[in-house]
Image (cartoon, helix red, strand yellow):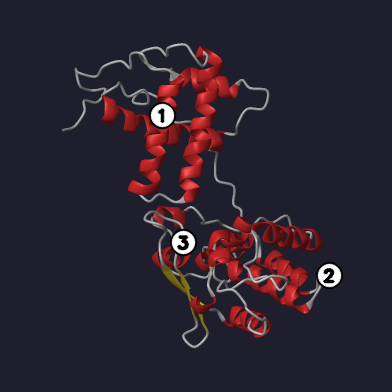
Amino acid sequence: MSHPSSQDAGAAPARGWLLSTLDREFAFFEHLLRYGKSQSSCTIANHLVAYKNLRTFLSATFGEARELPGTLFDPLAWLTWNRTKTKPPGEASMHTYWSKNRTFFRFLVEKHGIPDLFEKSKAPTLPARVPKARTPAECARILDAAEHGNWPSTFERFRAVAMLSIILFAGLRRREVLQLKRLHVDFDQQTINIEKGKGRGGGKQRITFIAPELDRVLRRYVQLRDQLRDAPPEFFCSRHHNGPVSVTTFRRIMRDVRASSGVPFTLHSLRHSFITQLLRSGVPLHTVSDLAGHSQLTTTAGYLRVWDEDKRRALTGFTYE
């Protein structure tokens, strides 16, 4: 039996609710996301951050022990509170807070039949997407810095180049890089099997392919990796212990190469570079979307960028004759 929504005459205020009541409801909601809907850890983390922000506002406005009003809160007052902070969140963060809390409160609408507070509330405007992709010259400089960096050993050198290359030439996300297994890199078939990418149900599975330049650096790394005693199943591993590369080590590698290359890149900008270069090379949108592991074509289209050299090339030989 469905509960009435705010559009139904039967929608009732949330009488007698405290912040602790809302906490219990959110705990149940989080459990549902994690185990009922198999949402990714990243999505759940975004929900947690968004609720924490809202809860801080409610605590500051009503206190911990006071009964919340029947309408619970005014979304506009919450947005205003955020924007008037000494260090207000950016508009992108505010959009995330708004959308994640809207999902939570729609859950409460369905469960308790309370009014939909977000029904007439407009989401914060997202800022224009700033292209994050690095230029081909910058990508080459990043790889060159990794190749000639001051690494403790040849193993660390080859591993750093391989980790950066697998993002630049195959578009893997950080979690996909760190969770990649040795048996999922098939040099005979020239494929990389990504088991738990981003997405619902524990993550999407996809197959991507090994470009010639990536093949060279991965084989070079694997030759040393497979000589390690008791190497773990993970593809990228430590030579000091029988375990995978940690997030801390991965961040250190990115930091060191960023400093030595002089290119202010982020891991995500390397993935942007992979997707952008495919699109600039004329690869069809749906093919790029599949290689990138996107669920929607519109997500891939958001990576489109017109570069200055593209505009210059388009006008070469331009005439009305």
Identify which amino acid the numbered label 2 is placed on.
Asn
Image location of residue 227, percent across then percent down: 67, 85
Which numbered dot is residue 197?
Answer: 3
What's the residue at 73%, 55% (across, down)?
A: 264
In the picture of the structure, the residue carrying the numbered disc 2 is 150
Point out residue 271 in the picture as x, y percentages from the top left corner.
Answer: 57, 61
Q: Quadrant of the N terminus?
A: top left
Frontmost residue, 125 versus 317: 125
List x then y, in percent, for residue 302: 48, 52
Query: Mark 2: which secondary structure?
Result: loop
The answer to which of marks 3 and 2 sits earlier in the sequence is 2
Q: Secondary structure at mark 1?
A: helix
Whether 153 is drawn above or below 93: the answer is below
Q: Residue at x 38, y 33 (%)?
A: 104
Instruction: Give the image quarter of residue 245.
Output: bottom right
Q: Which mark is residue 24?
A: 1
Instruction: Tell me which label, 3 or 1, sits earlier in the chain.
Output: 1
Ranked by sequence position, the earlier of labels 2 and 1 is 1
Q: Which mark is residue 307?
A: none
Residue 147 sits in quarter: bottom right
Identify the element where label 3 is drawn: loop
CA distance for labels 2 and 1:
52 Å
- Asked if residue 58 lies left or right of residue 239, the reply is left
